[in-house]
Image (cartoon, grey):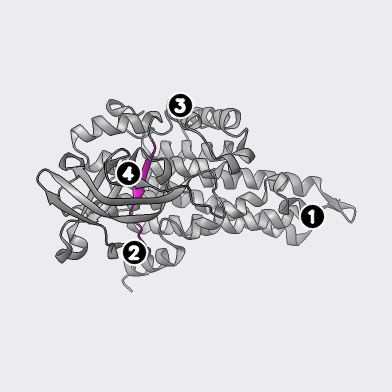
Amino acid sequence: MDFSRTEAQQRLCDEIRGFAREKLDPGTAERQVERFGRELWEQIGARGILGSCVPEIYGGRGRDVLTTILAMEALGEGCRDNGLTLGVNGQMWAVQEPIQRFGSEEQKERFLPKLCSGEWFGAHGMSEATSGSDTFALKTSAEREGSDYVLNGTKIYIGLAPVADLSLVFASTAPDKGRWGLSAFLIEKDTPGLTRSEVKQKMGLTSSPLGDLVMENCRVPGANRLGPEGAGLSIFNHSMQWERSFIFASHVGSMARQLDETVAFAKDRRQFGQPVGHFQSVSNRIADMKLRLETARLLMYKAAWTLDQGGDASMISALSKLHLGEGFFASSIDAMRIHGGRGYLTQYEVERDVRDSAGGVIYSGTSDIQRQLIARLLGL
């Protein structure tokens, strides 16, 4: 595995980092209250970021996975809005990738260009009140009526749900078959019987709207079923490899920015006649931040390499999700402690990383679930 960057990859990263700093970063603090609008999403789409690894025929740029990951890392380094960049990654890996892999030609031509351009928001709906970590205990049903399916159920904690133009939803078409009776559906926002909730207030990542998807006799055309009946388990497991591997791609860029700013502060801030970075308790925390950043990169790059090679990323995706989620949270707390009183005040935008990173140990599979997956893959 060779992770050295080509000249073309470095140029792309420099371009995206510069774009993020100039166009996306300004107004980040204000968006924590006002949320972000479609204009930023459309700018991201227009730069080819949303469709980075989608084939050009469907409105993308056709890049390989590793190049795309490098670009997403640069996006997070240039833009402090962790909610915005998380939403971008969520749509790319949990919505676009399954459509690209399992969608019919008609579905790809119909949906991918709108998602890649930023015209549409895409949501991924699996979690329910009775099926969080126990994913396949879901209750949402899908009954066949003629050429349509009628869906009933509620999906909760869904990123981009309140604004979603297209939702990938999992439901049971054969309850007697358990997890092998699940199917996947692509539901457009104006589908009768579909309700998108208001934005739920949360601790961090406030610029990325989160809410519920409620289906009450929601009639979905059979042409909007993704893959064959009963393929929901395979589709979900496939999409989770991608989501767990790369949902934090831009947060790795945030960790790099966070480290640079913390080092600069530790050099500039003086106490007892010397820079605070000279104190071992401070320098040790910074060394830990550097270690987390480099190991996070290596795990994420290896996941990208594995998927580029067509390999099974079950283990590396769980390792990557676990380490990146825990690492960003730990480094954010270290950065806040090093900055002292400044780090605790919202005006300096240090403490926001703590709030934004906290959710990373929960969503896309909790850290405890990742440990369980890793243990099972080791044969325990």
Label 3, residues with CA under 10 Å away: few <14, some 14-19, many ≥20: some
**Residue extent of the magenta highlight:** 121-131
Give the spatial CA distance, label 4 vs label 2: 18 Å
Residue 372: horizontal and vertical position, in percent?
38, 69
Residue ID for mark 3: 47
Judging depth in this view, the residue of 93 and 285 nearest the camera is 93
> Which quadrant holds the C terminus?
bottom left
Which residue lies at the image location 38% right of the left edge and 40% below the top edge? Answer: 164
Q: Do the CB atoms of the residues marked 4 and 2 lie less than 8 Å apart?
A: no
Mark 4–mark 3 Cα distance, whole angstroms, equals 23 Å
| Closer to viewer: mark 3 or mark 1 | 3
Q: How far apart are the two marked residues, 1 and 2, measured between alpha carbons? A: 49 Å
Circles 1 and 2: CB distance less than 8 Å? no
Label 3 – label 2 distance at C-alpha: 37 Å
Pinpoint residue 51: horizontal percent, then vertical percent: 37, 32
Up-down relation of residue 120 to residue 349 (above or below): above
Does the magenta stretch mainly form a helix, a strand or a loop? loop
Taking the spot 38% from the left edge, 49% from the top edge, the residue there is: 243
55 or 278, nearer to the observer: 55
Q: Is residue 228 left or right of residue 294?
A: left
Q: Secondary structure at mark 4?
A: strand
Answer with mark 3 or mark 2, whichever residue precedes in sequence: 3
Residue bearing the label numbered 4: 167
**Nearer the camera: disc 3 or disc 2:** 2
Kindly identify which numbered label has been placed on residue 278: 1
Tell me the residue that label 2 is attached to: 131
Among the two numbered marks 1 and 4 on one chain, the one whose residue lies closer to the N terminus: 4
**Sequence-earlier tag: 4 or 3:** 3
Instruction: Please report contact status of discs 3 and 1: CB closer than 8 Å, yes or no.
Output: no
Vertical relation: 36 (above or below) 370 = above
SS at mark 1 in the image: helix
Percent x, y for residue 329?
A: 57, 57
